[in-house]
Image (cartoon, grey):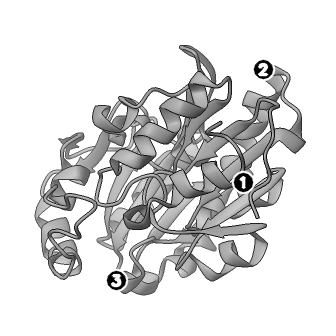
């Protein structure tokens, strides 16, 4: 049953599979964000993508800030509150280990994605079949955006990545299970499964332990003096678990990661079903 409320709320939205699908957001989601903000609510992007991989057309709806890199970077009204990166020696060790096992990976930083020369060919070989089965049109979202170009567009290529400053690694193809590599990195490094589940344990996201979306939300909360009870979070993937647990109201997307569904207070529809707009309406955020 809808619970109407007049008090200002702060809403944190995951992008992929939540606010947007295949890189595009339905018009109902854009309208919901704009209406909620006009009514005095705050709305933030809260994504695992680095800022360099967040398309301008996503941000065009208008947001009060962005949490990117799954909590590594936080910006509110143009002010950067946080920009965490791997410590240089550890960053170089991760690169060396991935290279030693001939893994196909991308280093994610706010200003760009970084990969070895030739990794784009590996990614096309590995991801082409995964993306090939996706529908080209679903009636609500135009899915004609090439998901490979979504990844490769911000890429910068080099033969030496040891000095790159980055916050996260997306690995798409490792001959050795990534969980085995993690043993050599120590407690400062974490691993979550890739959102592309078809890739199995040869893929995943390597991140700074203790850095997650809820940490980013806490930075916004402290800066703006928010009340945790007034925080709403919506997400669908493994990197959304902490933010849904932390929020006063955690909303999972139907069909999302089982662990996300398990911690959610509510369930909403995926982007093709205008789930963010439905959730906003049910919580009384649209008037």
| Residue closer to the observer: 231 or 26 | 26
Residue labelled with disc 3: 175
Residue sitting at x 72%, y 39%: 217
Residue at which label 2 appears: 223
Q: Which residue is mark 1?
A: 243
Label 1 and label 2: CA atoms lie apart by 17 Å
Query: Which residue is pictured at 52% across the width and 80% down the height?
Result: 255
| Gap between marks 1 and 3 measured at Cα | 32 Å
Q: Earlier in the sequence, mark 1 or mark 2?
A: 2
Mark toward the start of the polypeptide (1 vs 3) = 3
Q: Circle 2: is it few (<14), some (14-19), or many (20+) Cα within 10 Å?
A: few
Query: In 3D space, how far apart are the residues under numbered discs 2 and 3 (Cα atoms)?
Result: 43 Å
At 34% across and 42% down in the image, what residue appears? Answer: 53
Q: Quadrant of residue 223?
A: top right
- Image quadrant holding the C terminus, namely top right
Q: Secondary structure under badge 2?
A: helix
Depicted 243 relative to depicted 98: above or below = above
Secondary structure under tag 1 reads helix
Nearest to viewer (mark 2 / mark 3):
2
The location of residue 44, given as percent across then percent down, is: 58, 35
Tally the marks.
3
Residue 185 x %, y %? 62, 63
Q: Is residue 272 visible?
A: yes
User: Residue at the spot x=47%, y=67% of the render?
Assistant: 270
Q: Is residue 163 positioned above or below 40 on the image?
A: below
Disc 3 element = loop
Residue in front for this viewpoint, 42 or 36: 36
Disc 2 + disc 3, Cβ < 8 Å: no
Indicate which disc, 2 or 3, sits on the residue closer to the N terminus. 3
Nearest the viewer among 252 and 93 is 252
């Amino acid at each position: 049953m809808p619970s109407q409320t007049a008090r200002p709320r702060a809403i944190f939205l995951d992008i992929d599979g939540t606010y947007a699908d295949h890189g595009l957001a339905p018009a109902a989601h854009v309208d919901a964000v704009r209406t909620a903000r006009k009514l005095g609510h705050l709305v933030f992007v809260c994504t695992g993508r680095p800022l360099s991989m967040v398309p301008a057309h996503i941000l065009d709806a208008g947001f009060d800030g962005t949490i990117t890199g799954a909590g590594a970077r936080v910006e509110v009204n143009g002010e950067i509150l946080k920009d965490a990166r791997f410590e240089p020696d550890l960053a170089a060790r991760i690169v060396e280990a991935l290279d030693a096992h001939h893994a196909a990976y991308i280093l994610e930083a706010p200003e760009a994605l970084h990969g070895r020369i030739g990794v784009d060919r590996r990614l096309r070989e590995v991801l082409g079949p995964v993306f090939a089965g996706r529908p080209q049109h679903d009636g609500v979202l135009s899915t004609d955006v090439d998901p490979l170009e979504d990844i490769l567009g911000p890429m910068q290529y080099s033969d030496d990545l040891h000095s790159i400053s980055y916050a996260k690694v997306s690995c798409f193809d490792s001959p050795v299970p990534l969980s085995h590599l993690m043993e050599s990195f120590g407690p400062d490094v974490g691993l979550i499964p890739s959102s592309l589940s078809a890739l199995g344990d040869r893929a995943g996201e390597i991140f700074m332990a203790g850095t997650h979306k809820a940490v980013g939300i806490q930075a916004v909360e402290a800066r703006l003096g928010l009340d945790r009870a007034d925080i709403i979070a919506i997400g669908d993937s493994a990197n959304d678990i902490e933010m849904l647990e932390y929020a006063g109201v955690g909303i999972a997307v139907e069909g999302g990661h089982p662990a996300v569904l398990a911690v959610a207070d509510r369930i909403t529809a995926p982007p093709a079903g205008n789930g963010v707009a439905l959730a906003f309406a049910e919580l009384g955020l649209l008037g």
